[in-house]
Amino acid sequence: MRILKLAICATCLLAFSTLPLKAQYQGLQLPGFTGLQAGTQPQLPGYYVVMPLFYDYHDISIYGAQGNNVLKDATVGINVITLPTFAVVTPFNILGGNYGASFTEYIANGRVDVAAQNFKRSSSYSYRDIYVQPATLGWHLKRADVTNEMLAAMDWLPTLAGMVGASNLVPKDRPIDGVDASAFMLGKSITTGRDSYMFFGPDGELMSVKWKIYKTILRYSEGLDEPIVKPQFPMTYDLSSHPHEDWNLFSTKLTNGWMFAPVFRLILQYEASVKKYPNIKPGEEFKGY
């Protein structure tokens, strides 16, 4: 069985290594094959690849077959590394849908640590499994298109003005934070022109920054009657694979340091803008800059 797995692996790697591959840029999931967007396909026919990913799954309890907690204060975990995932979407149609396929390999280790029982076991990384999806069909209908583009409340002023041909009426004597997404709303563009957004708290201070598919939390609060908390390190999340913000990449992957560069660049740009053009206070008679 192991020889068969290795033969399949080698054949797929050899086949894909001779093809021009398209980089997967829509987050950590490969649309259409596994993960959050299973059941869809990449929009364009071609060959796709997702680079290796690292997952750290862990819990502090051991559960029985009925879901009951049989042992507390235990550390149970598994680290999973996906080797490059390869996928293909062909122009060949079956019942009107594009035919596609995918191939993924996994290596993993496991660990169990029960301090109260002085029990500790772990296994080293080893080849675990092959995931082959031999056939997918994707119907790329215009009415089924889904977008993850950002559009903020502040964008409506320039956007609505652009949609009715009145962009000349948008004030020119002050900076407008919103972007004109009228081309996107009218179906003339696939992007809104916005790739970032800042969230501010009730005290007017920055809480978090969303850049593309990533969200960096600088401060947070669990509720209106709860205090604002500043974590020891900024918390980062990949919203394409974890929209519920369950997995803090800073504590589970430690490969996200590069994400702070665009985030802090946005913060510096905002601070420079506010310094040059101070915010207009409520009720203030604005006389221009």
Image (cartoon, grey):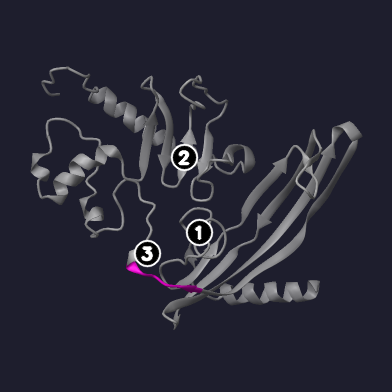
Mark 3 and mark 1: span between their CA atoms? 14 Å
Which quarter of the rendered picture does the N terminus lie within?
bottom right
Instruction: Give, as a three-letter code, the residue at label 3.
Output: Ala
Mark 2 and mark 1: span between their CA atoms? 19 Å
Label placed on residue 73: none
Instruction: Kindly give the residue lying farthest to the top in the view shown.
Output: 284
Report the magenta residues as a range.
137-142
| Residue denoted by label 2 | 215
Instruction: Kindly give the residue lying farthest to the front in the view shown.
Output: 66
Q: Residues within 10 Å of mark 2 (few under 14, many from 20)?
A: many
Residue at (44% x, 82% y) in the render: 95
Residue at (20% x, 32% y) in the render: 175
Q: For the residue labelled by badge 1, is the local secondary structure a helix, a strand or a loop?
A: loop
Instruction: Give, as a three-letter code, the residue at label 2.
Output: Lys
Which numbered disc, 2 or 1, marks the residue that appears first in the sequence?
A: 1
Which numbered disc, 3 or 2, marks the residue that appears first in the sequence?
A: 3
| Residue denoted by label 3 | 144
Q: Nearer the viewer, mark 3 or mark 2?
A: 3
Which is nearer the eye, 137 or 171?
137
Residue at (52% x, 23% y) in the render: 230
- Residue 278 placement (x, y as % from top left): 24, 22
Q: Nearer the viewer, mark 2 or mark 1?
A: 1
Q: Residues within 10 Å of mark 3 (few under 14, many from 20)?
A: few
Instruction: Give, as a three-letter code, the residue at label 1.
Output: Gln
- Residue 6 placement (x, y as % from top left): 74, 72
Mark 3 and mark 2: span between their CA atoms? 26 Å
Whether residue 30 is situated above or below residue 265 in the rendered picture: below
Q: Nearer the viewer, mark 3 or mark 1?
A: 3
Is 140 one of the magenta-colored residues?
yes
Which numbered disc, 3 or 1, marks the residue that appears first in the sequence?
A: 1
| Residue denoted by label 1 | 37
